Image (tube, rainbow, N blue to C red):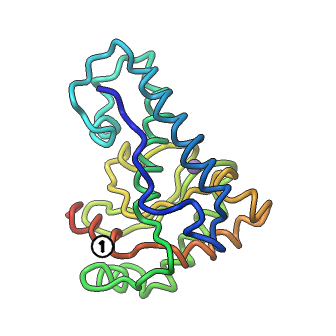
Amino acid sequence: MAYTLPALGFKFEALEPHIDAKTMEIHHGKHHQTYVDKLNGALEGVNIGDKSVENLLKDLSVVPVDKKQAVINHGGGHANHTLFWRTLTPGGAAAPAGALADAITGGFGGLDALKTQMETAGANRFGSGWAWLVLDKGKLAVNSTANQDSPLMAGQTPLLGVDVWEHAYYLKYQNRRPDYLKAIWNVINWTVVAENLAKAK
Ligand code: MN3
């Protein structure tokens, strides 16, 4: 099957001033599209049935050895960005509620502590990668991966990911990655994060 670029649920300018329209246009339309195209290219002639990209990353054994790194890079890029767009929302974010709020309080002491841990994980990622809130063996955890590596490959379920590749923030924030990491909380869709947690359990 061929993978396709998911539509954004909002306009490119909808996340202004926190994420600028030009960044969103290039990030979604060029970067993410390229991951999709290169994933499809790598899997040309390979029968993977109708596996979702997430299931492919959970079990790379169906991928030929010489295609594996391409699937990790571009399949990871496709899965990571698909999750990322869904957890962004225009017009500010609702606070976590219900089971997600309880899990954050239980796991981190509170939302501010979670934010600090994710900002630290993102700021300390050398080069390109992601900061994550994941479900790992039934518990919330914060970590970071390099490049487009997906937590799914480590048996974790990503609930929220923050892209810390320069293409995610450079036009507006240049070298100020920590400022971007602070600003992005204004556009996180906690309702979707809560849905991701419910599905992961
Ligand atoms: Mn990106």
**Nearest the eye: 140 or 111:** 111
| Residue found 39% across the figure and 36% down from its top | 4
In the shown orientation, is residue 172 left or right of residue 184?
right
For residue 148, above or below residue 117: above
The image position of residue 177, as x and y in percent, is 71, 64
Q: Residue furthest right?
A: 175
Q: Amino acid at mark 1?
A: Ala
**Nearest the eye: 116 or 2:** 2
In the shown orientation, is residue 146 left or right of residue 4?
right
**Nearest the eye: 185 or 117:** 185
For residue 53, above or below residue 118: above
**Quarter where residue 105 is shown:** bottom left
In the shown orientation, is residue 100 left or right of residue 144?
left
Which corner quadrant holds the N terminus?
Answer: top left
The image position of residue 26, as x and y in percent, is 63, 47
> In this figure, which residue is indicated by the disc labeled 1?
194
The image position of residue 181, as x and y in percent, is 63, 70
Q: State whether label 1 is within 8 Å of ligand 1.
A: no
Q: Residue furthest top?
A: 45
**Nearest the eye: 145 or 48:** 48
